[in-house]
Image (tube, rainbow, N blue to C red):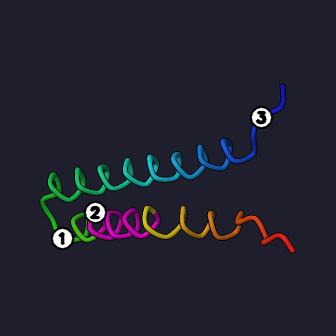
Amino acid sequence: MSADPARNRWLVMVLVRIVASCGAVLGLMLLTRATEWPPKLLGVAIVLCALYVMAVVPRALAHRWRTPPRP
């Protein structure tokens, strides 16, 4: 039984979103528990990067995997 490539690609995009959301939660935890400014700035940077990854990477993967139009 061969796996459907569309299913595997969808799973990869979902996993990217899940990992990015875990990163955002990690950044929020760091942001709220830190007492000094450098760790707080690191938490903000992690949250912003995770949100960027969550928004851009799945769309870029879908664009890369798009089936070419049939002639």
7 horizontally vs 49: left or right? right
Above or below, 67 against 30 in this view is: below
* Badge number at residue 61: none
Query: Where residue 61 sits: x, y (%)?
Result: 63, 64
Count the labels in the image: 3
Q: Which residue is mark 3?
A: 3
Above or below, 1 against 48 in this view is: above
Q: Give amino acid for label 1.
A: Trp
Query: Where residue 59 sits: x, y (%)?
Result: 54, 67
Quarter of the C terminus within the rendering? bottom right
Q: What's the CA distance linking mark 1 and mark 3?
A: 48 Å
Considering depth in this image, is 55 or 49 the residue closer to the camera? 55
Q: Which residue is mark 1?
A: 37
Q: Give amino acid for label 3.
A: Ala
Seen at 52% across and 52% down, the residue is 16
Comparing marks 1 and 2, which lies closer to the viewer? 2
Seen at 38% across and 47% down, the residue is 22
Report helix, strand or loop for mark 2.
helix
Query: Where residue 12 sits: x, y (%)?
Result: 61, 48
Comparing marks 1 and 3, which lies closer to the viewer? 3
Considering depth in this image, is 17 or 50 the residue closer to the camera? 17
16 horizontally vs 42: left or right? right
Q: Which residue is mark 2?
A: 43
Seen at 31% across and 67% down, the residue is 42
Mark 2 surroundings: few (<14), some (14-19) or many (≥20) residues within 10 A: many
Q: What's the CA distance linking mark 1 and mark 2?
A: 10 Å
Membership of 45 in magenta stretch:
yes
The reply to whether discs 1 and 2 touch (Cβ–Cβ < 8 Å) is: no
The span shown in magenta is 42-53
Seen at 59% across and 70% down, the residue is 60
Q: Give amino acid for label 2.
A: Gly
Report helix, strand or loop for mark 1.
helix
